[in-house]
């Protein structure tokens, strides 16, 4: 198995495992302080995207994200046979592993479990899949920016 497929599977499985632990060991809306006044575990249900966006359009959201993930995975698996673009492949592996984790839960339960809260003004509650999506997407964006600058030289 390539390191990219491993990263994809590990991001998906880490998301599923942490959500399962929260679901089993915390009541819904239960909040536990990890770092005083800063970081909390907070068991929340999210029926939409970030900040509950599109929660009234769950069917459309599920189909649209499923289509996007499928198209993206098709692109990702096509890149795997190419020896270059290692950082981009790793970023895509994280991004799609996380996206698949949230989509899978949304298909099964019509919501996503969020549980990480870092106190701040308008701060969202998020999960491991969201972290993988942001880190992976950031890595892909960074590699694209850097490859664009390198090709202009």
Image: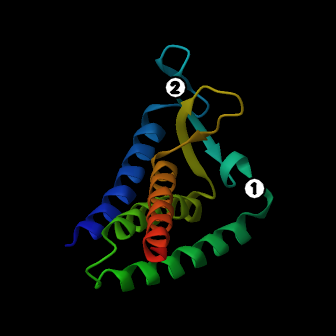
Which mark sits nearer the N-terminus, 2 or 1?
2
* The one of 141 and 120 positioned closer to us in this rendering: 141
Q: Quadrant of the N terminus?
A: bottom left
Q: Position of residue 91 (x, y in %)?
A: 40, 63
- Image position of 65 (left or right of 84): right
Q: What colouring style does the render use?
A: rainbow
Q: Which residue is mark 1?
A: 55
- Image position of 98 (left or right of 89): right
State yes or no: discs 2 and 1 in contact (Cβ < 8 Å): no
The mark found on residue 21 in the picture is none
Q: Position of residue 113 (x, y in %)?
A: 55, 46
- Image position of 75 (left or right of 60): left
* The one of 150 and 112 positioned closer to us in this rendering: 150
Q: Residue furthest right?
A: 56
- Occupied quadrant, residue 6: bottom left
Residue at 73% across, 71% down: 60
Q: Secondary structure at mark 2?
A: strand
Residue at 34% across, 65% down: 87
* The one of 131 and 47 positioned closer to us in this rendering: 131
Which class describes the residues within 10 Å of circle 2: few (<14), some (14-19), or many (20+)?
some
Q: Which residue is mark 2?
A: 40
- Image position of 32 (left or right of 89): right
Question: Does 44 sit above or below residue 98?
Answer: above
Residue at 41% across, 53% down: 16
Q: Quadrant of the C terminus?
A: bottom left
């Amino acid at each position: 198995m390539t390191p990219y497929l491993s990263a994809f599977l590990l991001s998906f499985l880490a998301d599923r495992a942490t959500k399962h632990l929260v679901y089993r060991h915390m009541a819904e809306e239960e909040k536990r302080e990890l770092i005083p006044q800063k970081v909390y575990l907070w068991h929340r249900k999210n029926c939409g995207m970030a900040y509950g966006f599109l929660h009234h359009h769950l069917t459309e959201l599920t189909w649209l994200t499923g289509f996007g993930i499928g198209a993206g995975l098709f692109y990702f698996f096509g890149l795997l046979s190419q020896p270059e673009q290692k950082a981009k492949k790793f970023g895509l592996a994280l991004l799609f592993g996380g996206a698949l984790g949230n989509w899978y839960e949304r298909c099964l339960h019509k919501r996503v479990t969020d549980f990480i809260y870092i106190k701040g003004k308008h701060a969202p509650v998020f999960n491991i899949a969201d972290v993988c999506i942001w880190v992976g997407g950031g890595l892909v964006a960074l590699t694209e920016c850097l490859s664009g600058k390198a090709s202009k030289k």
